Image (tube, rainbow, N blue to C red):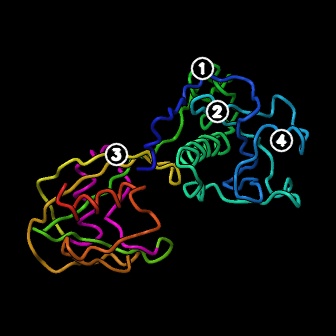
Amino acid sequence: MFQDIQPHHLQNQNDQQRPPRAGDYVLIGRQGAVVLTAASELPTYEMTQTDWSFTADQYVYLLAVDKTAFYWVDVDAQAQATDAYQVGATRDFRRMTPSWLAFSSATAAHLAWWYDTNRFCGHCGQPLRRGTTERSLVCDACGQTSYPTIMPAIIVGVTHGDKLLLTKFLAGYNHYSLISGYTEIGESFEDTVRREVFEEVGLQVHNLKYFGSQPWAPSHSLLAGYFAELDKDIVIDLETDELAKAQWFHRDDLPHNAEDGTMSLTWTMIEAFRHSKN
């Protein structure tokens, strides 16, 4: 899946930060917009030294993969674009190659988004400063400490014998997918599975089986995947605010998605069902 970057190793501990050096990558921008090279790659530290005049304290350490570190420079991306650079969206990082660079860039963008959207204390309104050891934002005025935002969510493959339920969204992602949704406060993953299935297609499920998890930086989420068996074969009652379609597919007739392959948890689960590995 997306996070499987072996033999490379993600190092996201804040206390391992160091000054930038040759070969490191830099996210230049804010609000999901970032400066990219003509080849749709992140600029390296050497490029920023040659083509911009950022000061040393503008480089915010995010994480490292092996010996390659990633930094954020908090400026307007559009204002930095030149003939040699373009403005892109961090949500498209998952299409980068090689795969370790895609995952590390997306994860770095998740952290940059958190810094970008948490500049002031939610309790007293005073400016926050970055923690020096653990990954945190600290308010010196009232002592409030904030930690990176990670949104828990579920993906569920609803099964009925040799059939799997797939859905399509009204807008945005145009491929078949599994039912998914965010976990509410005070709710377990299992309760989220049951609630989301009932809300989206009006069905009830049992025999929930955990499949696996995935950090998914584009939505700032940690996804938990489950398979669940249909309670009773009744007509689907489709929730039409978000979904355009819900359809049962026999495992021999499941659609393929060449765009995602097995990168996402959704399609890893679909392929597992296709090959009777769920």
Quick one: label 4 or label 1, which is nearer the N terminus? 1
Q: CA distance from mark 1 to mark 2?
A: 15 Å
Residue ID for mark 3: 213
- Packing grade of label 1 (10 A; few <14, some 14-19, many >=20) is few
Report helix, strand or loop for mark 3.
strand
Q: Vertically, is 241 above or below 205?
A: below
The amino acid marked with disc number 3 is Ser
Residue 170 part of the magenta-drawn span: no
Question: What segment carries the magenta color?
Answer: 174-202
Residue ID for mark 2: 68
Residue 252 is tagged as none
Residue 187 part of the magenta-drawn span: yes
Q: Nearer the viewer, mark 3 or mark 4?
A: 4
- Frontmost residue, 242 versus 108: 108
State the residue at coordinates (41%, 62%).
261
Q: CA distance from mark 1 to mark 3?
A: 26 Å
Q: CA distance from mark 4 to mark 1?
A: 24 Å
Q: CA distance from mark 3 to mark 4?
A: 36 Å
Report helix, strand or loop for mark 2.
strand
Quick one: label 1 or label 3, which is nearer the N terminus? 1
Quadrant in the picture for residue 263: bottom left
Instruction: Report the side of 100 relative to 21 (left or right).
Output: left
Residue ID for mark 4: 48
Instruction: Report the side of 86 relative to 55 (left or right).
Output: left
Quick one: label 2 or label 4, which is nearer the N terminus? 4
Q: CA distance from mark 3 to mark 2?
A: 26 Å
The amino acid marked with disc number 4 is Thr
The amino acid marked with disc number 2 is Thr
Quarter occupied by the C terminus: bottom left
Quick one: label 1 or label 2, which is nearer the N terminus? 1
Residue ID for mark 1: 15
Quick one: label 3 or label 2, which is nearer the N terminus? 2
